[in-house]
């Protein structure tokens, strides 16, 4: 089984914000898989499904973005999933909108939810799919920017970015990280 984690903040207040694109990509993957029912587990919502012939557990941590690691650690340990079989999907305000980056390992790059996961799992060997939401306008505070909503003009690019990120996650599942990086970076 593979574990896909979408990062975001819980609650209606944060739905549709830039910081919740990880949740949005995971929801799109669940819809593509036939909309399996979610249940509360591991301080989050989970659903188990099959995507492109691969058994997958989708996890939406409900611990707040910056504390996502406890939820991910609990799911990973319960199912005995190795780090290479885990993919974290998160926003990145340093990447332009409609840009995705898949990496096998590395630093959190300022993404606090990813930083908490890396810290809890004990290493940087955590595959991640970063979904570009930037750039931050020069006059705006990055924290306010990521918690803001997309403009009407950005919605078209966002829809393409979410579809492309879901395609990249499916490629990671079925073809492996190298193929996904070659296709979607």
Image (tube, rainbow, N blue to C red):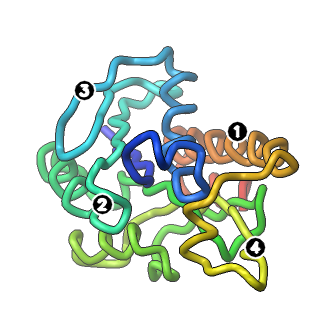
- Nearer the N terminus, badge 1 or badge 2? 2
- Packing grade of label 1 (10 A; few <14, some 14-19, many >=20) is some
Relative placement, left or right, of 153 versus 142 is right
Give the left or right position of residue 65, taking residue 156 as reference. left
Image coordinates of residue 70 in percent, x first then y, are: 19, 60
Disc 1 target residue: 163
Q: Of callouts 3 and 1, which one flags the residue occurring earlier in the amino acid sequence? A: 3
| Tags 3 and 1 touching, CB below 8 Å | no
User: Would you identify the image quadrant in which residue 47 lies?
Assistant: top left
Q: Earlier in the sequence, mark 1 or mark 4?
A: 4
| Alpha carbon distance from label 1 to label 4 | 20 Å
Q: Nearer the viewer, mark 1 or mark 4?
A: 4
- Marks 2 and 3, Cα distance to the nearest angstrom? 17 Å
| Alpha carbon separation for disc pair 1 and 2 | 24 Å
- Residue toward you, 154 or 32: 154
- Callout 4: 10 Å neighbours few (<14), some, many (20+)? some
Depth check, front residue: 153 or 113? 153
* Placement of 24 over or under 110, stated as above or below: above
Provide the residue designation for mark 4.
135
* Picture disc at residue 61: none
Q: In the rendered view of the protein, which quadrant contains the N terminus?
A: top left
Q: Circle 2 is placed at which residue position?
A: 68
Q: Which of disc 3 and disc 4 is earlier in sequence?
A: 3
Using the image, determine if residue 51 lies above or below residue 26: above
Confirm whether residue 161 shows in the render.
yes
Q: Position of residue 74 (x, y in %)?
A: 15, 52
| Viewer-proximal residue among 128 and 96 | 96
Residue that label 3 marks: 39
Q: How many other residues sit within 10 Å of disc 2, few (<14), some (14-19) or many (≥20)?
A: many
């Amino acid at each position: 089984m593979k574990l896909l984690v979408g990062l975001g903040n819980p609650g209606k207040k944060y739905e549709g914000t830039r910081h919740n694109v990880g949740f949005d990509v995971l929801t799109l993957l669940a819809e593509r898989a036939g909309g399996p029912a979610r249940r509360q587990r591991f301080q989050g919502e989970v659903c188990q499904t099959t995507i492109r012939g691969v058994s997958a557990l989708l996890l939406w941590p409900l611990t707040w973005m910056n504390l996502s690691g406890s939820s991910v650690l609990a799911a990973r340990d319960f199912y005995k999933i190795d780090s290479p079989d885990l993919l974290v999907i998160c926003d990145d305000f340093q990447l332009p909108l409609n840009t995705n980056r898949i990496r096998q390992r590395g630093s959190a790059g300022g993404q606090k939810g990813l930083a908490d996961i890396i810290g809890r799992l004990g290493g940087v060997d955590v595959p991640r799919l970063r979904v570009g939401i930037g750039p931050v306008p020069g006059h705006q505070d990055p924290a306010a920017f990521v918690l803001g909503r997309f403009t009407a003009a950005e919605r078209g690019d966002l829809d393409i970015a979410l579809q492309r990120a879901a395609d990249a996650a499916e490629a990671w599942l079925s073809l492996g990280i190298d193929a996904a990086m070659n296709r979607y970076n």
